[in-house]
Image (cartoon, helix red, strand yellow):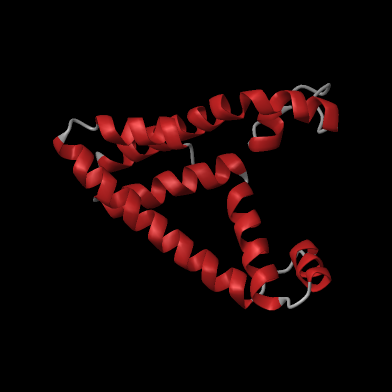
Amino acid sequence: TCVMFLTRLPCPGWCDHHPGYLMRSMAHFPLIGALIGAWAAAFYDAAASLWPPLVAAAVSMAGTLWLTGCFHEDGLCDTLDGFGGGWTKSQILKIMRDSRNGSYATMGGCMWVVAKAALLAELGRGAAGAGGASVWAVGGSAGA
């Protein structure tokens, strides 16, 4: 249930998002997050051997965006739209349930992607002098 909830990986047919299973699977969220972070670090290392750090960061982000189905980015954009476009609690919740992106989600999502890519590239530059260990440590401890 945890893998099905946090990633796009195929799961056995008996897995589902039943609230009881999901609550029990929350204990495994840190482990799955660490594995997603290791996935990101592996993509970064592979790309960094071919391209500059900023391109490697973009490749790493693309890998984790695919793996997670943009799970966190979707939540961030919903929140930005809700708090940016709504005045009352009911308006905010209505906007957050809407599947369309508004201007706050679009601009905030763009700023998030640029900032994340720049940060990962900077971490990659620092890791190059440390034998790459810090990219794996950050990836494994922070997840995607």
Q: Is 41 displayed left or right of 62 in the figure?
A: left
Coordinates of residue 130 in the picture (x, y in percent): 17, 33
Q: How many discs mark residues in the rendered view?
A: 0
The residue lying at 37 percent from left, 55 percent from top is 117
The residue lying at 65 percent from left, 55 percent from top is 75
Coordinates of residue 24 in the picture (x, y in percent): 75, 23
Coordinates of residue 97 in the picture (x, y in percent): 79, 62
Q: Say above or below: 123 vs 6.
A: below
In the picture as drawn, the residue positioned furthest to the front comes out as: 88
The residue lying at 69 percent from left, 77 percent from top is 85
Coordinates of residue 63 in the picture (x, y in percent): 48, 43
> Is residue 1 visible to us here?
yes
Q: Say above or below: 63 vs 130.
A: below
In the picture as drawn, the residue positioned furthest to the left comes out as: 129
* Rendered-image quadrant of the N terminus: top right
Q: Is 76 displayed left or right of 12 in the figure?
A: left
Q: Is 93 displayed left or right of 75 in the figure?
A: right
The residue lying at 74 percent from left, 64 percent from top is 96
Q: Say above or below: 30 vs 81.
A: above
Is residue 136 or residue 42 the one in the foreground? 136
